Image (cartoon, helix red, strand yellow):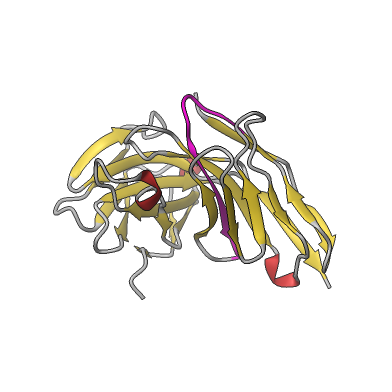
Amino acid sequence: GDSVTQMEGPVTLSEEAFLTINCTYTATGYPSLFWYVQYPGEGLQLLLKATKADDKGSNKGFEATYRKETTSFHLEKGSVQVSDSAVYFCALRGPGNFNKFYFGSGTKLNVKP
Amino acid sequence: DTGVSQDPRHKITKRGQNVTFRCDPISEHNRLYWYRQTLGQGPEFLTYFQNEAQLEKSRLLSDRFSAERPKGSFSTLEIQRTEQGDSAMYLCASCSYHRGLATSSTDTQYFGPGTRLTVL
């Protein structure tokens, strides 16, 4: 079945460091891929998405490229800030009309000043 | 703010009691989803509605769980005879789906803040 695997955390970085959070997926067909972010005490917020191979989603300095050949959607940011500290979830939406999402287990990011 | 809202935000109950949660989706969204999120895990799909019809239920949804969306707007999730294993965050999400439209315009789910359930 469809599934998402993302790197375990926590990831601890100093401010202005480069961030990569790995995400790989298993799916039949051609899913849409998402990154959601969850700040402490809040619900999930959409960070970025890509709907077809080679698409790059970007938002707030974060980027991820849909790589069909490696079934990956790694999240990157060139210079993290303390305010980026949160839990990041990779997710896929299966093809078809059910619109059901499959989430990874989340990666906690701690950014230190 | 016209985002997804959930009520209550926190619920503490004793084992064996029944609880009911409410979700109000974004008003123009016709699809509504329930997820469960346990500590350190991502959300797991429970069930979803298109308008008032419940179209799919996960095998995670035991017969103690029931969900309704009577008028195609808000939804309720009821858990009967709660067990300690039911302790989790229950998330609601909504989206707009229209068959035949480009998926990029309809496949983003918007999440509510969740209801945290603690069963003692």
Instruction: Let me know if residue B7 appears in the view.
Output: no
* Left or right placement of residue B58 versus residue A70 in this view: left
Q: Which residues are magenta?
A: A25-40
A67 magenta-colored: no
* Left or right placement of residue A22 versus residue A51 in this view: right
* Left or right placement of residue B6 versus residue A83 in this view: left
Instruction: Let me know if residue B73 appears in the view.
Output: yes
- Give the residue displayed 32% in from the left and 36% down from the top: A97
Residue lying at the far front in this picture: please name it: A54
Q: Nearer the viewer, residue A6 or B120?
A: A6
The quadrant where residue B101 appears: top left
The quadrant where residue B75 appears: bottom left
Q: Nearer the viewer, residue B88 or A28?
A: A28
User: Does B10 sit above or below residue A76?
Assistant: below
A36 magenta-colored: yes
Q: How many marks?
A: 0
Q: Residue A99: image x %, image y %?
A: 37, 40
Q: Residue A32: image x %, image y %?
A: 48, 40
- Give the residue displayed 30% in from the left and 50% down from the top: B32
Q: Residue A44: image x %, image y %?
A: 51, 58
Q: Residue A41: image x %, image y %?
A: 56, 66
Residue lying at the far bottom in this picture: please name it: B1
Residue lying at the far left in this picture: please name it: B71
The quadrant where residue B12 appears: bottom left
**Quadrant position of the N terminus of chain B in the picture:** bottom left
- Give the residue displayed 63% in from the left and 53% down from the top: A88
User: Does A80 sit above or below residue A8?
Assistant: below
